Image (cartoon, rainbow, N blue to C red):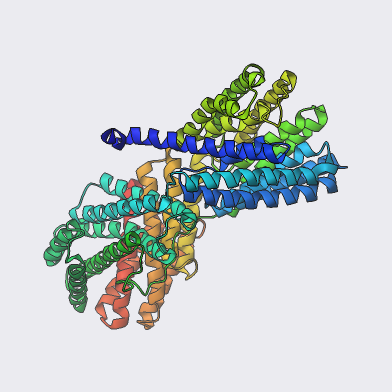
């Protein structure tokens, strides 16, 4: 039996069933308490328990905190809006739609699990506000009751998931870190061994997505019940090292390919490869320090005679090898600190570097576009409701607002809405069966729990699986409302049928409006990310923009955003992601050259400023370099490199590495573009 449960598929099924059972227990506990204290809509406590429940105890608590905060803000906003504008239905609809759009805008800018609080602020206003238009004088009492019902659902969900067979997130997080460290060493080893470009790309892309996933998990760690948790500073430092490894591996791979047979560094390369393969050996730390010193000595020896043939690429490669070993050594040390839950004795080879951590790409223009589209769709639904005087229009517009709030934070929300509608269809069928066949025969609470268990346990098991989570949402949100799970049975077939119609009309209208007003084509989204990256490179050439670690992290996040979009794009996956790495490297080299200005002085500094100005001018519009601009820049960089090498001084030598890095980054663009290379 133990061997069977270790199989990934069976283990996932067992985890899903356990999660479903715990969530159902939390929902029934919340429902029972709501009935005993006399809340008017105890079904909301059930819904909240399912919305808050997550597969780990820490995530359930954090989601509950965010939901409660969003509910309080949304309820307060509704209480302020409805009485003020109820005499002007169109103005009231406009203000409510604007509030929901504004909350969606904030959630799109946040891009962390905390964004759920902003989503709930709009979600709550829609749920309370539109149905409350019919009774504006009772809006405060309605809002207060909803807060109580939702708070009860949160409390029960958090309690059950934290007490009954809790699943801490810290263990999962530590396991993810160990996997990422293995991936990082494989990436470094592949770069040194000259592995195929396909394998290298796969390693880089996996690491970029892992960094995004790790950041999402880290957000929930402060809420986890585990006693020993990784320190935030440690996590930031580890992220910075792993993010820097992505472009660094490419730099080393290209240098080795260009040099063909780097004889001067062959022994060092072999020993670094052996050290990477021997991860975790007792003398790994001491060996790492020796390798770093050897690489620094090789760089110093090569740059002592920069004019000698082969010395410039040798010195540049040696410097990158020293950084590679230092980064991996630091990652190992930080990984041990995370595993042990303690603090490291020293700050590592790069301990003096500021820890930035994950930096999210935020695009206010696109967030405003999506939010305006959502508000416009909701307002259109309100106008149709007002024009038609539909009795159930308040419920329909309320569901429309919820749909736009919950699903509006992705480029193409319609597919997720369709999954939700399929789940709602199952929920409606089950609700009608419960309302008019099963529930009339139920006379006590234990029997009620028993008859509800099959449907909710099924829905909960679907919720635990990402592929069916949206369908599960349709099931678990629909049954409590349409089945009339109140203090007493009050089955009304006409009301249930009208509510079902309102539900499907609203979600269908929401899918259509989001497709027209909120959907961003994959190619458009990718091109915008590329244009913004080029503009940021232009800014870095002028000494602006984020610091080095922040720039690297920002570009890693943009790469993680592009990866899932490529499945729906006509663009070449390899070329697109290679361009992102190239822009990252170009920005890194341009900033390094900018920092080295003033060291050499005279004509060298003047020419370096001219190179940076030409690079900034060429990329300032967001367009990629054309063939003429690339050729001119290459000539300028080559001339400046030769000038700096011909006048060896401490100041001029500081320019060599960023100049060589910049030239290689720009040369990779020509190699990836046949027309430019020609």
Q: Residue at x 49, y 43 (%)?
A: 54
Q: Closer to the camera, 147 or 188?
A: 147
Q: Closer to the camera, 605 or 181?
A: 181
Q: Position of residue 447 (x, y in %)?
A: 58, 25
Q: Position of residue 5 (x, y in %)?
A: 31, 35
Q: Position of residue 488 (x, y in %)?
A: 71, 28
* Outermost top residue: 437
Where is 596 relative to 327, above or below?
A: below
Q: Residue at x 69, y 23 (%)?
A: 501
Where is 397 relative to 159, above or below?
A: above
Q: Closer to the camera, 371 or 577?
A: 371
Where is 285 relative to 34, above or below?
A: below
Q: In the displayed structure, does residue 37 sit left or right of residue 259?
A: right
Q: In the displayed structure, does residue 314 sit left or right of residue 164?
A: left
Residue 108 in view, yes or no: no
* Outermost right residue: 87
Q: If the image is split into quadrants, where does the N terminus sit?
A: top left
Where is 211 relative to 470, above or below?
A: below
Q: Residue at x 64, y 18 (%)?
A: 441
Quarter of the view holding residue 485 = top right
Q: Position of residue 516 (x, y in %)?
A: 62, 35
Q: In the displayed structure, does residue 351 sit left or right of residue 82?
A: left
Residue 91 in view, yes or no: yes
Total number of numbered labels? 0
């Amino acid at each position: 039996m133990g061997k069977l449960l270790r199989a990934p598929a069976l283990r996932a099924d067992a985890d899903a069933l356990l999660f479903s059972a715990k969530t159902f227990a939390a929902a029934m506990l919340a429902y029972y308490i709501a009935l005993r204290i006399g809340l008017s809509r105890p079904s909301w406590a059930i819904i909240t328990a399912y919305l808050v429940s997550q597969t780990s105890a820490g995530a359930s608590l954090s989601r509950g905190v965010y939901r409660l905060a969003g509910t309080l803000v949304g309820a307060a906003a509704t209480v302020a809006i409805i009485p003020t504008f109820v005499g002007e239905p169109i103005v009231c609809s406009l203000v409510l739609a604007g509030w929901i759009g504004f909350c969606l805008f904030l959630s799109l800018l946040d891009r962390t699990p905390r964004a759920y609080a902003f989503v709930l602020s709009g979600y709550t206003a829609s749920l309370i506000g539109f149905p409350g238009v019919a009774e504006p004088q009772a809006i405060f009492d309605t809002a207060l009751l909803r807060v109580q019902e939702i708070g009860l659902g949160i409390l029960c969900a958090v309690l059950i998931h934290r007490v009954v067979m809790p699943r801490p997130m810290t263990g999962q997080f530590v396991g993810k870190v160990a996997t990422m460290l293995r991936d990082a060493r494989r990436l470094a080893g592949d770069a040194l061994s000259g592995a195929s470009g396909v394998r290298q790309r796969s390693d880089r892309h996996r690491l970029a997505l892992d960094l995004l996933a790790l950041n999402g998990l880290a957000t929930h760690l402060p809420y986890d019940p585990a006693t020993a948790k990784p320190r935030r500073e440690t996590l930031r430092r580890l992220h910075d090292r792993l993010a820097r490894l992505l472009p660094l591996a490419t730099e080393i791979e290209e240098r080795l390919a260009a040099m063909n047979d780097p004889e001067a560094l062959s022994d060092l390369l072999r020993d670094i490869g052996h050290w990477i393969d021997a991860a975790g050996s007792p003398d790994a730390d001491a060996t790492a320090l020796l390798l770093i010193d050897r690489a620094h000595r090789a760089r110093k020896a090569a740059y002592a005679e920069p004019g000698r043939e082969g010395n410039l690429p040798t010195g540049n490669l040696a410097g990158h090898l020293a950084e590679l070993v230092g980064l991996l050594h630091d990652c190992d040390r930080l990984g041990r600190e995370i595993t042990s839950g303690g603090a490291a004795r020293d700050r590592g080879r790069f301990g003096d570097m500021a820890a930035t951590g994950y930096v999210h790409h935020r695009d206010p223009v696109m967030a405003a576009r999506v939010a305006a589209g959502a508000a416009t769709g909701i307002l259109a639904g309100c106008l149709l409701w007002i024009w038609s005087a539909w009795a159930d229009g308040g419920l329909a517009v309320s569901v429309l607002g919820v749909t736009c709030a919950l699903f509006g934070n992705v480029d193409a929300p319609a597919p997720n809405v369709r999954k939700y509608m399929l789940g709602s269809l199952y929920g409606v069928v089950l609700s009608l069966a419960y309302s008019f066949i099963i529930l009339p025969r139920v006379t006590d609470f234990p029997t009620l729990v028993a008859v509800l268990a099959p449907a909710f346990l099924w829905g909960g098991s679907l919720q635990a699986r990402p592929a069916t989570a949206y369908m599960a949402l349709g099931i678990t949100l629909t049954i409590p409302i349409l089945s009339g799970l109140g203090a007493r049975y009050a089955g009304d077939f006409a009301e249930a049928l009208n509510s079902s119609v309102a539900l499907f009309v609203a979600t269908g209208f929401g899918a259509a409006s989001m497709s027209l007003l909120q959907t961003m084509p994959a190619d458009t989204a990718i091109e915008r990310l590329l244009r913004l990256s080029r503009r940021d490179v232009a800014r870095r050439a002028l000494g602006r923009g984020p610091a080095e670690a922040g720039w690297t992290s920002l570009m890693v996040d943009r790469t993680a955003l592009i990866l899932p979009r490529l499945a729906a794009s006509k663009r070449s996956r390899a070329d697109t992601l290679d361009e992102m790495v190239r822009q990252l490297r170009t920005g890194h080299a341009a900033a390094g050259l900018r920092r080295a200005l003033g060291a050499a002085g005279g004509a060298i500094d003047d020419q370096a400023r001219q190179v940076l100005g030409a690079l900034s001018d060429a990329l300032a519009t967001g367009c990629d370099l054309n063939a003429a601009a690339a050729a001119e820049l290459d000539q300028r960089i080559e001339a400046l490199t030769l000038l700096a090498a011909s006048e060896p001084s401490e100041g001029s030598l500081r320019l060599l590495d960023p100049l060589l890095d910049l030239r290689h980054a720009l040369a990779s663009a020509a190699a990836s573009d046949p027309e430019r290379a020609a």
